[in-house]
Image (cartoon, coloured by chain):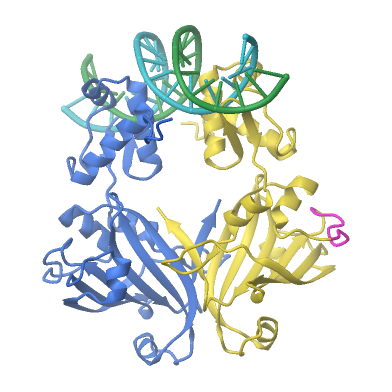
Chain colours: A blue, B yellow, C cyan, D green
Amino acid sequence: MASIPDFQPLYKQVYGVLVQRIAEGAWRPAQALPSEQALAGELGVSQGTVRKAMDALAAENLILRRQGKGSYVAEHTQEHALFRFFRLARPSPDCRRITPQLGEEKIRRRAANETERSRLKLRKNAQVVELRRTRLIDEIPKVIEKIVLPLSLFPGIDKQQALPNTLYSLYQGVYGVNIAVAKEELRAILANKGDAKELRIEPGTPLLQIDRIAVALDGQPVEWRVSRCDTRDIVYAVDVN
Amino acid sequence: MASIPDFQPLYKQVYGVLVQRIAEGAWRPAQALPSEQALAGELGVSQGTVRKAMDALAAENLILRRQGKGSYVAEHTQEHALFRFFRLARPSPDCRRITPQLGEEKIRRRAANETERSRLKLRKNAQVVELRRTRLIDEIPKVIEKIVLPLSLFPGIDKQQALPNTLYSLYQGVYGVNIAVAKEELRAILANKGDAKELRIEPGTPLLQIDRIAVALDGQPVEWRVSRCDTRDIVYAVDVN
DNA sequence: CAGTGGTCTAGACCACTTA
DNA sequence: AAGTGGTCTAGACCACTGA
């Protein structure tokens, strides 16, 4: 009768506890979690149950397990975070992933507009930080990015010097914000005059626009990013399975 | 010393056996596999080991498990296959998936050109079937597709009447070809005159081009598909995690 | 009711890491 | 050598399905 969200299996409860602790920053990135035995003892379940929960965490790239060493909160290192979210590659049959360089960068603080409040679920009068930058491939600008962040989650990020290539490691390391998933929407558009100037191309060149909302472990949207890419020499690569 | 591909864990061997049997069509789609107990007995391992292998199969959508009933080879039904590979949706905040209708269709048989031989790993003189069709959304053509198949894998497919909306269920049901993954490459292009006519738009409209190679369970590329989409009202949606 | 997959436990042994 | 995760087993009980 009761349509209460029914009791979860033990291993899912354990999973939930661990996610919450990671989200709270109980264990810093790259720091070892307690061993399976220790957690099993603390939580009063068998080692196998903890294992199943931790295997699920590992499958979602939330932790990294290494035989003989231990389990670690997954670290958004430069390399890692790049290839997790940056999906541009050379077209087949080459298919090599691309490591982009950073180009020009402008950052400013301002009030959120209506679109931003809606996409990022912000209150009226919320402040955001807007970052615009270009990314270069082989020294040539190929991507322009507009990144919008709620200032409340990232206080003083606009005063930070030298933002890294992959912001997600900064979010995680400095602000304790772990990105769980990113929802992307792709479409084809035409370069306007501003795009054309920054990318050194003709207005009217087709561009791939990637509209991304990054969602943290707790389900809150924490970043809105719109990228425009010149895909004449590179492609956006996905594996569907 | 020996860098021989080392012995696999038992459950991976079991996994391999099961994949092979599915690929061979030992169990037809929608037909029940033997129970965990039965397989464990037959293969001489414990039930837990079979379970781990089958859980992996389920995680990859190769089989479907249902408590109380049994495990089934995943069926590429219309609904299923559509939402697995057809990623067009309405832009946020709506986000509903789109079910496209079928429009015009042309099919012909011919020799493979060099690009096709390379993409599909075909021999010289190989024959292919080329299918061109449009897909409608709300009665308006939004996508044009060019699909190229090796005739050797799909004999007589060009004589088939009434090709379904989702070809993958046909490949699986009639030809025993199970699609394991699809590798997609996306880029922005401009509509040429032919595109424009079929989509009833102006030449020079930006289109999202999706270049997909579908790979079967045995690793063979079995379909090359190039889709061109008018993404002014719809988007290609991806979740990255 | 019997049979299925889902959960949970307990314990064994192995492979790898570090000291 | 001690501690970690990885594999494997055996057996228990539960929840769901269908005859």
The residue under the point 37% across, 36% down is A5
- Is-magenta flag for residue B157? yes
Give the side of residue B132 with respect to residue B228, left or right.
right
Q: As drawn, which residue projects farthest toward the front?
A: A1
Give the camera-side residue of C8 and A28: C8
Is there any visible trace of residue A67 in the rendered image? Answer: no
- Residue A105 in which image quadrant: bottom left
Q: How many marks?
A: 0
Give the camera-side residue of D8 and A129: A129
The residue under the point 49% across, 74% down is A187
Residue B193, image x and y in percent? 67, 88
Magenta part of the chain: B153-161
Residue A216, image x and y in percent? 29, 54
The residue under the point 29% across, 72% down is A116
- Residue B225 in which image quadrant: bottom right
**Where D19 falls versus A88 (above or below)?**
above
Is there any visible trace of residue A23 in the rendered image? Answer: yes
Give the side of residue B154 with respect to residue A132, left or right.
right
Residue B24, image x and y in percent? 74, 37
Residue B103, image x and y in percent? 73, 71
**Where C4 falls versus B196 (above or below)?**
above
User: What secondary structure is the stretch in magenta mostly built from?
Assistant: loop
**Where A167 falls versus A12 (above or below)?**
below
Q: Quadrant of the N terminus of chain A?
A: top left
